[in-house]
Image (tube, rainbow, N blue to C red):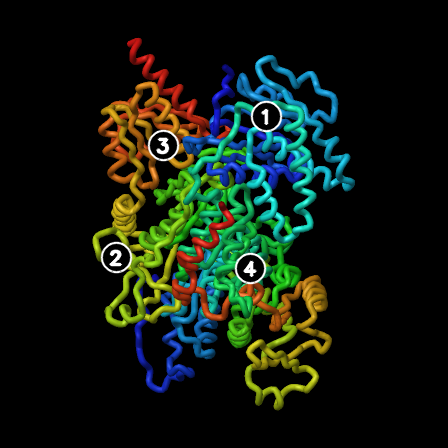
């Protein structure tokens, strides 16, 4: 029996095209078709840093068990790009299928004894039915949608429903698109024994869920958090976050009659400026944020240091991509963990939140503003391209209408009226968090803020003890922060174990799948996913209570492990790194392999 | 000596402004700059201008970068919020502050290094946004705090005290601002407070980006014989193109009709410009550029209100932001609520 057999509602389809050919909407349509049939799906876009003509892939994992990571294997390849045939053929798992456009003679590269190759004359059928050149390109995409529907048994009614929604604004286009879909569908029905063993059947597992990407969810979170100032400089893969904020605000924060906006977005001239704008707005009392990626963080570091030392709230979204330098802008990585945690010169460290999926992007966006204002400091939401730009199935976003923002210790005019003298950096409450005032407030609250050395009263100083006093108080605040950041997610293995996996952010899905696979093999491992920095007491306790900890992360230098060494009492030898840094999202196989190897070594010892 | 407080003495009979405050309410900490520094005169002019305009001190906000000039924001308006930030980034921080609260009076103080070298990009883009602020450059042609290196405004062939010759051409903030499209451009001299105060006042009233480049000699590093930024050189080469006249009575009494140009501000008030040269038109950008350049070629420093257009939208106008400052909006008016969240998720199914 081939690997593809018995794979009902559990397989991976990968579509290889050239970018700029309009395949994104066809691929999105397929993803949603599975979702609407009640089957959990994962959508991953592997795209080039280019606008037109370069190879691009879209991978859809149909997963009845609801796993959220990529599988690491491909069962059905739709190879629409001759340029990548060789690579695409190689990627198909033994027993899998490859569909190609048989309008042109089959190339030698398109053969492998252990897979089934299906040629469909897609271009020819489309060219016979449509005259316009651009329309032909678009309709060829729809034709492969139809072919796939027949091959894996997607319900045509679902597809028709999606097409009608897609073209609700241009209903004239519906018949043509359906015609193209039927061309592919009918050809398969007439020529191939279908559906393939690799197929779907309706389930009921997507109710109460949405398909959304993390950047959209984070942008929405900023709206709900009450953020009014967004400053940014366009950079992949963060751009869609500010785009989302902008489009939600256009609908939800714009006066319908006057067109007046209850928000402002400033596109800075660079990331230095964007960070400065965010900081200035935070200082004046707005909830302000910036969106960027690694190269932007490098530039913003200067302003982040100023915000840290002069104690001004600001929220920064870092949608990580592959570094160093320009790196691979459209591939994913967790290479900014340390630069975000310790950005800027001198003794600085920053509160970070690590969303693992789009729902957490939404929630942590709100949380980030609360923490930034409570702690009067920069807060990073450290997301990545995989979470930010890919389509994830997550439970519906919910909102508690009783939520009110935590604006932190801001003295009102009435409070200022009552006090004799305001001092900006006094630790009145013993939590390391001073009181602040906003520009424009009661004259008693006037304050001269500075990045230069200052004492606890807010005055300029070059006196050693006065300087050190403030630096030490910032550490008290840091300890307070560790009690306020979200607590880690912890999962105990069914049976007692002193082995654990410790991870962060988008590794979550792969780790949880690995836990399930390992459990199937009788290997129980505990799990902890860090959700915030500074590390809370639970992280320290997990490290202390396990003999061996596999630290799973997506960078070369084991940055999370380095931070754990730096910030906790863990012994170095206890931690084994499991790393993935090739730019593709983490899959469970890498983790399972590492742990199985360790088990084998232990048995041999 | 910022820790040394100025004595708070209430002199009897001291003039008060429309708010009933004396000028002392607009002063700041003691200056720590060198004795005779031009910047201190600018500080005094700032104090006077805010006092005369009757702006409540707590409605003003001072922002600066790094350098001798940037230190001065501590030396005036001690009842206002101030932010002495990092080198060259004052414009972006002011942009953010103004984005959040459009109602306050923002004054940025910068130097020639802070503006024309490390901060040239931010300077240019604050102009592009027509950010509603007063931007004052205290321009002395040298880096003072690091002991006398040339800045980008030093003229070609200028010599340092040690005899080093500047081999790079200068970047002129006036011509730069004209080219970038600034809506209010003026130049003054720190040695002439009577000239500077009306310009600061007009700049504060202007809606949009108001630049005042103030030649402000550095007595420690750039006031010697071979300097083109010394007191001596400035006094010998100043050329006033268009001055502001404050008092309406004076206008009728002393000036010919043709030489006075009334300019209507966005709030309906009128300022009056006395044109030294009848051909000069400070509402014509191309001619202003030409005029400044021709006089520069003769080694002259053109001063006065050189260009003004008070009719343009500022950053918020261009954005169509609501009139009230964003910081004053209640959370209830910003959060769409749970029902909206449920309904907008339909498209993600």
**Mark 3 highlights which residue?**
A503
Q: Residues within 10 Å of mark 3 (few under 14, many from 20)?
A: many
Decide which of B181, B160 is in the foreground and name it. B181
For the N terminus of chain B, which image quadrant? bottom left
The residues bearing labels 4 and 2 have C-alpha atoms spaced at a distance of: 35 Å
Q: How crowded is mark 4: few (under 14 residues within 10 Å), some or many (20 or more)?
A: many
**Residue B175 visible to an observer of this rendering:** yes
**Residue A329 visible to an observer of this rendering:** no
**Mark 2 highlights which residue?**
A426
**Mark 1 highlights which residue?**
A194
Q: Residues within 10 Å of mark 2 (few under 14, many from 20)?
A: some
Q: Which residue is drawn at 36% across and 16% down?
A: A597
Q: Where is residue A403 in the image (x, y as percent from the top left)?
A: 33, 57
- The label nearer to you, 4 versus 3, is 3
- The label nearer to you, 2 versus 1, is 1
Report helix, strand or loop for mark 3: strand
Q: Earlier in the sequence, mark 1 or mark 3?
A: 1
Which chain does the numbered disc 4 sit on? B
């Amino acid at each position: 029996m081939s690997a593809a057999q018995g794979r009902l509602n559990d397989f991976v389809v990968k579509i290889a095209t050239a970018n700029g050919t309009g395949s994104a909407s066809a691929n999105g349509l397929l993803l949603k078709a599975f979702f609407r049939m009640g089957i959990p799906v994962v959508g991953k876009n592997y795209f080039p840093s280019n606008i037109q003509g370069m190879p691009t892939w879209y991978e859809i994992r149909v997963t009845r068990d609801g796993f959220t990571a990529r599988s690491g294997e491909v069962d059905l390849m739709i190879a629409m790009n001759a340029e990548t045939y060789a690579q695409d053929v190689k990627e198909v798992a033994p027993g899998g299928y490859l569909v190609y456009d048989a309008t042109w003679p089959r190339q030698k590269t398109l053969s492998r004894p252990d897979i089934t190759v299906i040629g469909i004359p897609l271009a020819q059928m489309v060219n016979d039915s449509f005259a316009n050149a651009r329309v032909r390109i678009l309709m060829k995409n729809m034709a492969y949608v139809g072919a796939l529907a027949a091959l894996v048994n997607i319900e045509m009614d679902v597809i028709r429903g999606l097409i009608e929604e897609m073209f609700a604004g241009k209903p004239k286009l519906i018949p043509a698109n359906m015609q193209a879909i039927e061309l592919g569908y009918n050809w398969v029905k007439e020529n191939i024994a279908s559906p393939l063993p690799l197929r779907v059947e309706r389930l009921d597992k997507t109710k109460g869920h949405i398909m959304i990407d993390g950047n959209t969810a984070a942008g929405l979170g900023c709206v709900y958090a009450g953020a009014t100032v967004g400053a940014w400089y366009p950079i992949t893969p963060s751009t869609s976050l500010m785009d989302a904020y902008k489009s939600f605000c256009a609908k939800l924060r714009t006066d319908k009659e006057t067109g007046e906006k209850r928000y402002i977005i400033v596109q800075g001239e660079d990331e230095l400026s964007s960070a400065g704008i965010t900081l200035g707005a935070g200082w004046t009392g707005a909830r302000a944020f910036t969106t960027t990626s690694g190269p932007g963080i490098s530039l913003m570091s200067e302003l982040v240091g100023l915000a840290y030392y002069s104690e001004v709230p600001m929220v920064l979204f870092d949608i990580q991509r592959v570094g160093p330098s320009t790196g691979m802008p459209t591939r994913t990585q967790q290479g900014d963990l340390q630069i975000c945690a310790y950005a800027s010169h001198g003794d600085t460290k920053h509160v970070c939140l690590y969303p693992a999926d789009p729902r957490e992007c939404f929630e942590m966006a709100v949380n980030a503003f609360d923490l930034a204002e409570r702690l009067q400091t920069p807060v990073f939401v450290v997301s990545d391209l995989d979470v930010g730009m890919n389509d994830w199935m997550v439970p519906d976003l919910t909102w508690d209408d009783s939520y009110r923002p935590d604006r932190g210790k801001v003295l009102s005019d009435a409070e200022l009226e009552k006090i004799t003298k305001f001092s900006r950096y006094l630790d009145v409450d013993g939590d390391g968090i001073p009181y602040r005032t906003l520009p424009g407030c009661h004259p008693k609250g006037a304050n001269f803020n500075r990045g230069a050395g200052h004492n606890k009263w807010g005055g300029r100083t070059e006196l050693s003890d006065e300087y050190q006093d403030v630096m030490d108080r910032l550490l008290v605040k840091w300890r307070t922060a560790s009690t306020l950041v979200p607590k880690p997610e912890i999962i105990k293995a069914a049976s007692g174990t002193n082995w654990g996996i410790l991870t962060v952010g988008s590794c979550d899905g792969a780790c949880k799948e690995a836990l399930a696979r390992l459990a199937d093999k009788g290997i129980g491992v505990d799990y902890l996913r860090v959700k915030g920095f500074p590390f809370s007491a639970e992280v320290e306790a997990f490290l202390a209570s396990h003999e061996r900890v596999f630290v799973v992360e997506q960078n070369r230098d084991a940055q999370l492990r380095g931070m754990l060494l730096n910030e906790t009492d863990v012994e170095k030898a206890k931690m084994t790194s499991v790393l993935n840094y090739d730019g593709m999202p983490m899959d469970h196989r890498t983790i399972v392999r590492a742990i199985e190897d360790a088990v084998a070594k232990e048995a041999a010892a | 000596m910022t820790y040394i407080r100025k004595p708070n003495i209430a002199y009897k009979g001291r003039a008060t402004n429309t708010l009933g405050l004396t000028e002392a309410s607009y002063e700041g900490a003691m200056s720590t700059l060198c004795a005779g520094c031009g910047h201190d005169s600018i500080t005094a002019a700032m104090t006077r201008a805010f006092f005369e305009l009757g702006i409540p001190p707590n409605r003003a906000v001072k922002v600066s970068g790094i350098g001798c000039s940037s230190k001065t924001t501590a030396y005036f308006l001690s009842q206002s919020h101030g932010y002495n930030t990092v080198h060259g980034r004052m414009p972006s921080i002011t942009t953010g502050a103004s984005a959040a609260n459009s109602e306050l009076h923002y004054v940025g103080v910068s130097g020639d290094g802070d503006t024309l070298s490390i901060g040239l990009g931010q300077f240019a883009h604050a102009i592009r946004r027509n950010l509603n602020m007063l931007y004052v450059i205290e321009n002395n042609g040298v880096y003072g705090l690091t002991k006398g290196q040339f800045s980008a405004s030093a003229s070609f062939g200028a010599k340092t005290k040690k005899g080093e010759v500047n081999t790079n051409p200068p970047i002129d903030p006036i011509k730069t601002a004209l080219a970038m499209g600034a809506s209010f451009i003026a130049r003054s001299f720190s040695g002439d407070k009577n000239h500077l105060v009306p310009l600061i006042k007009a700049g504060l009233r202007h809606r949009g980006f108001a630049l005042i480049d103030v030649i402000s000699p550095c007595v420690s590093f750039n006031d010697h014989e071979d300097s083109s930024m010394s007191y001596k050189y400035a006094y010998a080469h100043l050329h006033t193109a268009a001055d502001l006249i404050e008092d309406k009575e004076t206008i009728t009494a002393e000036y010919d009709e043709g030489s006075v140009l009334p300019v209507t501000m966005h709030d309906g008030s009128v300022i009056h410009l006395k044109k030294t040269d009848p051909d000069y038109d400070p509402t014509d950008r191309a001619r202003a550029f030409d005029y400044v350049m021709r006089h520069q070629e003769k080694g002259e420093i053109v001063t006065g209100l050189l260009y003004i257009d008070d009719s343009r939208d500022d950053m918020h106008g261009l954005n169509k932001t609501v009139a009230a400052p964003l910081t004053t909006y209640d959370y209830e008016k910003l959060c769409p609520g749970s029902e909206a969240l449920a309904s907008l998720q339909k498209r993600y199914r």
